Structures are given as structure tokens and as C-alpha cells.
Amino acid sequence: MHFDFEPGDLVINPKNRDWGIGQVQSIIKNKITVNFQNCGKKVINSEVIVLEKVKK
């Protein structure tokens, strides 16, 4: 699976926008670890949730 982002990129979870902006920490297969402003570190299954990259 190919992602259009890499560690360090800023993303949002469109299903939980109240989590705030998150920074991608790591990507291992379909598991993306993101540190979000409002809820801390979350492991996202990219097969279930499609993250959106924040435009700089």
C-alpha cells in the first residue's frame, strides 16, 4: 500500500476532526502511528481510516 505522506508530515483524521492536527511518527505496513494535538498518540489502521494530509 502506498501513502502520500511520510514521518513528520501533518495529517488529520476526517472521522475525528476534534483530535486536531497530528504528526506522523511511523508507518509500518498498514499501521500509521500519529501524535495528535488533542488526544495524543494513536495507531491508525490505514485500511479502515484514510488520513488527510494537511496543506502547508
Image (cartoon, rainbow, N blue to C red):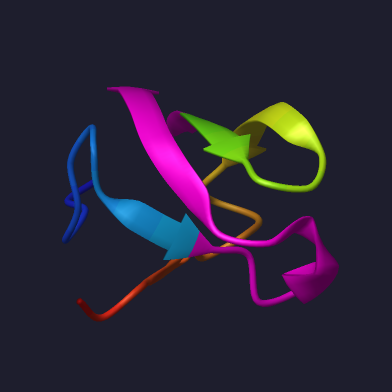
Q: Is residue 10 left or right of residue 4?
A: right
Residue drawn 46% across the image and 32% down it: 32
Is 16 covered by the magenta stretch?
A: yes
| 32 relative to 23, above or below | above
Residue 26 placed where, x, y %? 34, 21
Is 22 covered by the magenta stretch?
A: yes
Residue 2 placed where, x, y %? 17, 51
Q: Magenta segment range?
A: 12-32
Q: Does the rendering let one see residue 29?
A: no
| 5 relative to 12, above or below | above
| 26 relative to 6, above or below | above
Q: Is residue 29 left or right of residue 23?
A: left
In the picture, residue 13 is in which quadrant?
A: bottom right
Q: Does the rendering let one see residue 4?
A: yes
Residue placed most toward the observer, 55 or 6:
55
Q: Is residue 19 left or right of residue 10?
A: right
In the picture, residue 42 is in which quadrant?
A: top right
Residue drawn 20% across the image and 76% down it: 56
